[in-house]
Image (cartoon, rainbow, N blue to C red):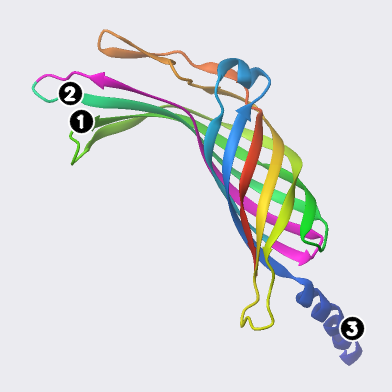
Amino acid sequence: MRRLMLVLTLIAVPCTALAGHEAGARLDVGVPKGDFADNLEDPGFGLVGHYAWSPAPAFAVGAGLGYMIYGSETRVVELPLVEDVDLTTTNNLAAFHLLMQLRAPRGPVRPYLEGRFGGQYLWTESKLEDQGYWDDDEVGKEVNYDDFALVYGGGGGLLIGLRSPRPTDRKPWALDLDLKALWLSGEKARYLTEGGIVIVGDRPVFHPSESETDLLHVEVGVNVRF
């Protein structure tokens, strides 16, 4: 029993010494590809973040979240007995994913490969706001259309060192510039695009699009290791 405990300790100590944690936040530009690009002319813009555990310098696993707006339009609506209000409709995408990275273990510039698997929720929301400059109150909002799709894919990137751990640090940490590009294939979904809602009389008429939801993600941000 003592020998077994000694062996486990000898294995655990170096693994613990190599283990580390990291968190990152990045700006995200999503460029539609394939059939998705036929329905969306412009890229989407948003934010994405992740948290990961690195049991060894060349390997990391974790999870991430992202949010993106891929379309928005505002029109003025006249209502009886009240001031005119703005009707703003946004097309949104929220995503979650599991990730795995294989990367160069050391150096000021560390290239890496990344794979992702998860899902993305697409929804269109309309919101009424009064036009008062100072109060800008929200009158009401409603989700008009939504759908969900699985997503998977991968790509690569670079971690460029901005700060390395110092001997004087009580809690060592490092900061990297994180640049990456990933192709993520999304399953087929139904969604609204700009102009997908037409007001006929006083009733909205929806014209949804349907396609696979492939996106090329270009992400730029920072990664903190601790």
Q: Which residue is mark 2?
A: 84
Q: Quadrant of residue 9?
A: bottom right
Q: Are marks 2 and 1 in contact (CB under 8 Å)?
A: yes
Asked if the stretch drawn in magenta spans residue 62, the answer is yes
What x and y, as percent, mark residue 160? 71, 56
Three-letter amino acid code at the position of disc 1: Gln
Q: Quadrant of residue 153?
A: top right
- Label ID, residue 7: 3
What x and y, as percent, mark residue 62? 68, 56
In front: label 2 or label 3: 2
Could you say which is closer to the camera, residue 128 or residue 122?
Answer: 128
Above/below status of 206 relative to 136:
above
- Label ID, residue 33: none
Residue stretch in magenta:
53-80
Q: Residues within 10 Å of mark 1 (few under 14, many from 20)?
A: some
Disc 2 to disc 3, how far (Cα)?
75 Å
Name the secondary structure under disc 2.
Answer: loop
Most common SS among magenta residues? strand
Could you say which is closer to the camera, residue 195 or residue 7?
Answer: 195
Locate residue 137 relative to residue 2 in the image: left or right: left
Could you say which is closer to the camera, residue 1 or residue 141?
Answer: 141
Dot 1 or dot 3: first in sequence order is 3
Above/below status of 37 relative to 220:
above
Disc 2 to disc 1, how far (Cα)?
7 Å
In front: label 1 or label 3: 1
Q: Are marks 2 and 3 in contact (CB under 8 Å)?
A: no
State the residue at coordinates (65%, 76%).
172
What x and y, as percent, mark residue 226? 65, 70
